[in-house]
Image: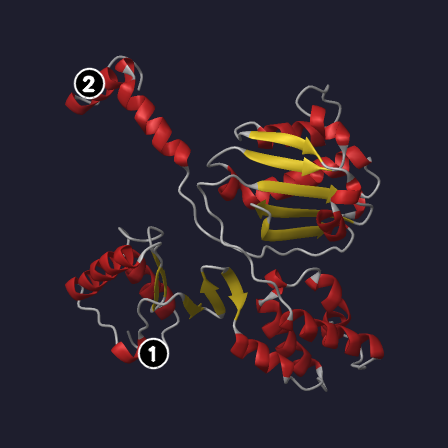
Amino acid sequence: MPFGLINAPATFQGLMNEVFASLLRKGVLVFMDDILIYTQTLEEHAQLLSAMLQILANNSLYAKPSNCSFAKDSIEYLGHVISSKGVATDPQKILAVQGWPVPNNVKEVRGFLGLTGYYRRFIKHYSLISKPLTMLLKKGIRFVWSSVAQEAFDTLKHALVTAPVLALPQFQKPFTIETDASDVGLGAILIQEGHPIAFLSQALYPKNAALSTYEKECLTILMAIDRWRPYLQAQPFVIRTDHKSLLYLNDQKIHTKIQQKALLKLMDLDYSIHYKKGINNVAADSLSRKPTNAVMAVSFCTPTWIDRLTAGYEKDEFTKQLLTELSISSENDKGF
């Protein structure tokens, strides 16, 4: 692939996706020339590694041994450290942030925010913390490094150094969403077995500021479902809220568009709503009061309902007969 062509990255990524189509998200991830293999056991790892190398050989693609790492329980990938414990920030990048000098102009502020922004999913309330710095990027504003900007600069540095390790989702186990809303924002946490998978918060738009508490709580559920649907559609999950009225969401009369939208979003999901006292819902409550927007872990799932549906079709006599007829001729009088 020649260097400098504007479409070279997209063309190369398309080639890799096509070549590894049979293995993608089934133990193999590919980003440009970075190939990641993930398995539960060493035996599975060896089998998948052999299949991956065979695909490379069949397509006249080569891997340089000095650039490869095999059978690791922790690996750096795209600026993150991935291990059995979860996903963490790259220590080398964090060292660069720790030693970052105080910016003297807009260009240097933009460079600092570019690096810290890459890890914003690890920092609660990143938007709020960085606001004094992002204000310096606006056109027509004189660059003045104030004590407020210095505090934001130091806080971001500290937040990156103490960033949490986020657990990796296990799609064969149930998820829980904890939600809460306040007068300034919405907050939600995706949890599995007590460990955080992702954090999400969002400021309330002015048009929603006057909504009732019940409607704000519904908005929080909508926000969480929209963002985390791929995690939730595979099996039953629990929604925990400190607003007791939401326990009767499915039985109440629909008086608002937000209620209607919430029910429509939840209609095809298997869920239950549980009440959690506000005093015990500290994490989600905190997120709702500090507006930001960050998802802290992304993974891929294979919904189990697809397998159950396929198995059901195989046992259904009408479907079996229909499939047999369609295999003989696609033209029939049944309108399919």
Task: Compare residues 193 and 255 and report the one nearer the observer.
Answer: 193
Q: Across the whole image, how many numbered discs are drawn on residues?
A: 2
- Which element is circle 2 on? helix
Residue 119 located left or right of residue 303? right
Q: Residue at x 29, y 17 (%)?
A: 316
Q: Check disc 1: other Cα within 10 Å, few if <14, some if 14-19, many if 20+.
A: few
- Which element is circle 1 on? loop
- Residue 271 lies, in percent from the top left, at 57, 31
Q: How is the image coloured?
A: secondary structure
- Residue 190 lies, in percent from the top left, at 60, 47
Q: Which mark is residue 3?
A: 1
Q: Quadrant of the C terminus?
A: top left
- For residue 329, above or below residue 28: above
Q: Residue at x 74, y 55 (%)?
A: 291
Q: Which mark is residue 325?
A: 2
Q: Residue at x 45, y 63 (%)?
A: 83
Q: Is residue 98 visible?
A: yes
- Residue 240 lies, in percent from the top left, at 67, 37
Q: Residue flagged by tag 1: what amino acid is it?
A: Phe
| Mark found first going from the N terminus, 2 or 1 | 1
Q: Quadrant of the N terminus?
A: bottom left
Q: Check disc 2: other Cα within 10 Å, few if <14, some if 14-19, many if 20+.
A: few
Q: Residue flagged by tag 2: what amino acid is it?
A: Glu
